[in-house]
């Protein structure tokens, strides 16, 4: 049954229209599908639990909301990747509010992986290529006529709408994951955040507010990434030096006998031996 999201930060949670039709996807052969009646019943139960979670979120009860979203996931058939992605993405929103950055990354990644099983971005790229080439590759022939043709056209419009919904939710999940990785910090996380923001910068229908966030992040991240890289490289060299001193000490040597010179072009290091006095 339909529900509406609470009025919350669009960067943090999905303000989606809950059209919970099943989406035909390539599920593994081991997945057992429910009958249409059973699926509808499970989705109704899942949607009711999701509505409760949304209400908890709107009153800042984020931990409790996570519990309700988890219940909604348990009720939702595990082959409905779109519905699962929406729930995982909203769980990521809760973790962001709780400043549990690692859990936010994990939940947002799970949402993105669910959507990737539907591969909408590849279809969108194909559609974009077709439009640039005059649209010949995207011509769809309607085989029926009259009422049958109207049904086929309605089915195509619904399919296109679902693809748009998938791309929109994917953008939301990427925004949340990028935010969480930025907050986690560190060379690898900051690089991952930059990669997500670069993907977001290529999306044609990103909301204006999100575009500003993406542009600001892409401008501020490079020096932060470089600083984190230098720090981690320095920490690693310090640990290697400590280890080396332990090995060399019995021979009356230390790492001070070896001069490390950084190659600014490649970022690598070369070593020269200096016996000393």
Image (cartoon, rainbow, N blue to C red):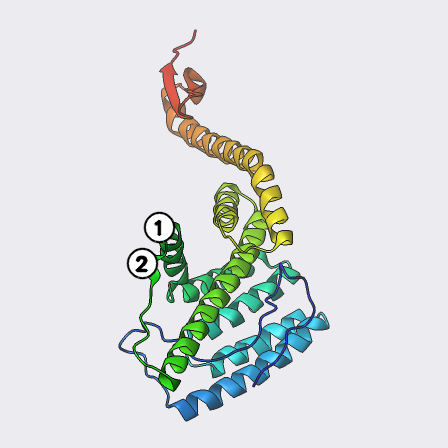
> Which residue lies at the image location 45% right of the left edge and 21% below the top edge?
264
State which quadrant residue 136 falls in.
bottom left
Residue 258 image point, x, y percent:
40, 18
Q: Which mark is residue 38?
A: none
**259 versus 213 height, above or below:** above
Q: How many marks?
A: 2
Of residue 12 and residue 247, the one placed in the foreground of this image is 12
Circle 2 SS class: helix
User: Looking at the rendering, in which quadrant would you find the N terminus?
Assistant: bottom right
Of residue 70 and residue 260, the one placed in the foreground of this image is 70
> Which residue lies at the image location 73% right of the left edge and 73% below the top edge?
59
> Which residue lies at the image location 35% right of the left edge and 50% below the top edge?
133
Farthest-out residue, right: 59
Mark pair 2, 1: CA separation: 8 Å
Contact (Cβ within 8 Å) of mark 2 with mark 1: yes
User: Looking at the rendering, in which quadrant would you find the C terminus?
Assistant: top left
State which quadrant residue 158 falls in.
bottom left
Farthest-out residue, bottom: 37
Residue 94 image point, x, y percent:
62, 66
Q: How many neighbours does mark 1 have within 10 angstroms: few (below 14), some (14-19), or many (20 or more)?
A: few
**184 versus 240 height, above or below:** below
Residue 46 image point, x, y percent:
53, 83
Farthest-out residue, top: 277
Left or right of 162 in this view: 24? left
Of residue 11 and residue 189, the one placed in the foreground of this image is 11
* Residue underneath mark 2: 137
* Residue underneath mark 1: 133
């Amino acid at each position: 049954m339909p529900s509406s999201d609470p009025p919350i930060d669009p960067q943090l949670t999905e303000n989606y229209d809950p059209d919970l039709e099943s989406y035909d996807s390539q599920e593994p052969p081991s997945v057992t599908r429910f009958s249409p009646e059973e699926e509808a019943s499970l989705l109704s139960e899942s949607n009711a639990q999701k509505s409760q979670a949304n209400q908890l979120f709107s009153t800042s009860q984020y931990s409790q909301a996570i519990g309700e979203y988890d219940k909604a996931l348990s009720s939702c058939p595990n082959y409905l990747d779109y519905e699962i992605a929406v729930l995982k993405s909203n769980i990521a929103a809760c973790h962001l509010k709780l400043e549990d950055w690692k859990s936010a990354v994990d939940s947002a990644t799970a949402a993105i992986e669910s959507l990737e099983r539907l591969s909408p971005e590849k279809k969108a790229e194909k559609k974009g290529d077709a439009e640039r080439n005059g649209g010949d590759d995207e011509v769809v022939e309607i085989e029926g006529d009259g009422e049958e043709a109207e049904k086929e056209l309605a089915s195509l419009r619904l399919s296109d709408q679902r693809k748009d919904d998938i791309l929109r939710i994917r953008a939301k999940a990427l925004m949340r994951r990028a935010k969480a990785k930025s907050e986690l910090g560190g060379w690898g996380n900051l690089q991952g955040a930059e990669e997500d923001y670069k993907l977001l910068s290529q999306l044609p229908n990103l909301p204006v507010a999100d575009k500003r966030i993406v542009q600001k992040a892409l401008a501020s991240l490079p020096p932060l990434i470089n600083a984190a890289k230098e720090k981690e490289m320095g920490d690693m060299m310090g640990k290697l030096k400590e280890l080396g001193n332990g090995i060399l000490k019995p021979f009356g040597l230390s790492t001070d006998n070896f001069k490390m010179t950084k190659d600014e072009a490649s970022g690598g290091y070369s070593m020269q031996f200096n016996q000393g006095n």
